[in-house]
Image: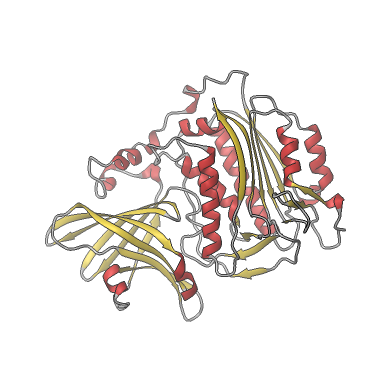
Amino acid sequence: MRWLLVLVMSLFWALISAQTLYDMRWSSEGIDYAGFMIYFNEEDIYMRVGYMYDGEYNLTHTEYHYDLATQKDGYVMMEGLESQYVIEGSDTEYEPFHIFWALDDANAWTGPYALDNYHAENDNFDDIVEVAMIELNPNLLTEEYLQYFYIPDDEDYYTLLNAKEQEQPAETINYIPDGQSTLHLIIIANTLIPDIGPSTNLDLHNASNEFEGIASALSINFNKIIISDKDFTKNTVASLLQNFQPAPNDVVVVIYSGHGFRFSDQSEKFPQLDFRYNDYQTFGPETCMNLKEVYDGITSKGARLNLVIGDCCNSDIGIPKQVGSSFLASRSTVNASMPKLQKLFLESSGTIIAAGASQGESSWGSNNNGGFFTNSFIGSLREETSVLRSNDEPRWEDVLEQAVKSTQTKAQMCQECKPQNPIFEEFIVDK
């Protein structure tokens, strides 16, 4: 199965995709604060905060992370951790502010709010203040704005300032030996099933946009194959595996979004895919296939790079349920580095197989935003190829490991969810 819910937490879905930028403004005890936050993933967040005190400008740097323990108490908090001065214009002994959202008496989420660490540790919530927060487009950042939060020695200042000036990939794609490469995206989505159909539709839409955008950025061909609605059958997939013929230099991405399960005596760690889209279809060998069979069929075709991902449960088949309520959502920006995209998609060879849950586990998703694992994978891919990761060499292993961690965190942050631990195997060779 893939279980459905809608998350009840702050920026959660806004921040599943990497390097989201936020401007935050609030006032506390007569001081006006301006914050610039960069969010990479749930455990990798920082905010620069600037403010005037006694006529002097002060600038601080604070690391943040999501405090998972707060969810059960009816609020969600991004906890400010260690702070340090970048510019100490006056002796204010800055206390990091925590940013959080809370349930009101009508069980609706409100916020964001800010409260400094001193008052939080003393359980003094009288000084909670509202935060004005907007998402920023990195292409519109100006020198004047960034100089409020960075000094000339800050590497991130130049990275952000130059984000909109990335070189076009056409100037550097000259190492493809066997002619033009094609990125084949195969999406197998159970869009008609009533319980998770809206979620799988979002996975289809999100994955299609993401990989078509990557192909366009890399100036390579794009071939999209969709298996959904009433074409969502084992026979359709089997026919595809038999007839699909990629070229040796191609990239093949397969994403399955639907129900999954495992047999009680099954030794294979990857899940069975369930190709039934209504309750009146008979369960049997003609309506299921293991993810490993799809992987074997794709990798046997000889493409240079293969990714096979199953966002589905990996537990004994059961009855799906839908829980929870909707919450805030917003968009994330793509700040991709062309050389990093080229490294992953044009200079790598090998195979990857990944499943959204380990043996015995459910795979969770949202009607508003799709599957946890699909969203985590896309967010991790964006993070690994971000221009803001200027010192990092992109690796598929890192993409997958961060997608696993992000999926685990999403499940932890959801009160109704049980643990979800994706699994993967990767055999990648760089050129």
Q: How is the image coloured?
A: secondary structure
- Name the quadrant containing residue 261: bottom right
> How many numbered callouts?
0
For the C terminus, give its image quadrant. Answer: top right
Residue 392 located left or right of residue 33? right
Task: From the viewer's perspective, tell me whether residue 214 is left or right of residue 313.
Answer: left
Q: Looking at the picture, tell me which residue is in the foreground, 76 or 106.
A: 76
Residue at figure coordinates x 67%, y 58% from the top left: 198
Camera-side residue of 3 and 163 = 3
Q: Residue 96 placed where, x, y %?
A: 28, 63
User: For residue 116, what is the image quadrant?
Assistant: bottom left
Q: Quadrant of the N terminus?
A: bottom right
Task: Residue 52: give x, y in percent of width and height.
Answer: 18, 59
Looking at the image, the residue that sits furthest to the bottom is 105
Q: Nearer the viewer, residue 30 or 73?
A: 73
Q: Residue at x 74, y 62 (%)?
A: 194
Judged left or right of residue 418, residue 298 is right
Question: Percent position (x, y) of residue 145?
Answer: 28, 47
Check the image and report above or below for 392 versus 234: above
Tell me: residue 138, above or below residue 56.
above
Q: Position of residue 56 (x, y in %)?
A: 13, 57
